[in-house]
Image (cartoon, rainbow, N blue to C red):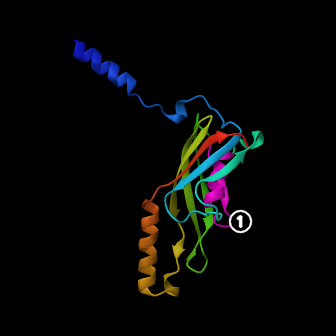
Amino acid sequence: MCFGAFSLAAAACSKVTDAADETPVDPEPGLYEVTLSGAALLRASGKEDPHSFCLTEVNRTAFPHTLVKKYYQLHYSCTNTPLPREGNRISGKLKCAADPKLAQGANRFVYEGAVLKDAVDINVRIKFDAVIKEEEMTKAQARELKLGMKAFELMKFVIEAERVGEC
């Protein structure tokens, strides 16, 4: 009987909450330290990691989507499409045209994450939807490009932003 009660108590304590089930909050205004991990595809602005971001009251709701755009937008014509928020879970996709020298079409950065009052955590994955222009390269180049694309699709890129004080 004691063992059964202990098992129930342990199960109740180990219940993991889903950000989608939480009451929505927006990050508090302030200075956020942004840490990036994953691959070198990140559009680093020449600053050393971690980066910082001063969040204002006006930008609180869009902050997670702004982070994805800031670090993964490959060029000005990319489009960021946030999906409807569920509790504190955010998601969306950033769609960018492929390099016209290598492929035709567009590629996507699909992202999802969680928002807290003092932090944001976002996981990003790339989906190569563009068609490679194999006729304009050697077989070895096409094979190498395809292998690289597959490797990138398997990777998870992470953006973490934590509030560290006032701006």
At which x and y percent is residue 61? 69, 41
The crowd level at tag 1 (other Cα within 10 Å; few <14, some 14-19, many 20+) is few
The answer to whether residue 112 of the structure is visible from this angle is yes
Secondary element at tag 1 = loop
Quadrant where the C terminus sits is top right
Residue that protrudes farthest toward the top in the picture: 1
Which residue is located at x 32 percent, y 19 percent? 8
- Residue 166 figure quarter: top right
At which x and y percent is residue 69? 65, 56
Q: Would residue 121 appear left or right of 65 to someone viewing this image?
A: left
Q: Is residue 129 magenta?
A: no
Number of disc labels: 1
Q: Which residues are magenta?
A: 63-84
Q: Is residue 82 magenta?
A: yes
Query: Viewer-proximal residue, 20 or 42?
Result: 42
Quadrant where the N terminus sits is top left
Which residue is located at x 28 percent, y 15 percent? 5
**Badge 1 amino acid:** Tyr
Q: Reply above or below: 150 against 29.
A: below
Q: Would residue 152 appear left or right of 103 to someone viewing this image?
A: left
Residue that protrudes farthest toward the right in the picture: 58
User: Circle 1 is placed at which residue position?
Assistant: 76
At which x and y percent is residue 97? 62, 68
The answer to whether residue 61 of the structure is visible from this angle is no
At which x and y percent is residue 96? 62, 65
Q: Reply above or below: 79 against 88.
A: below
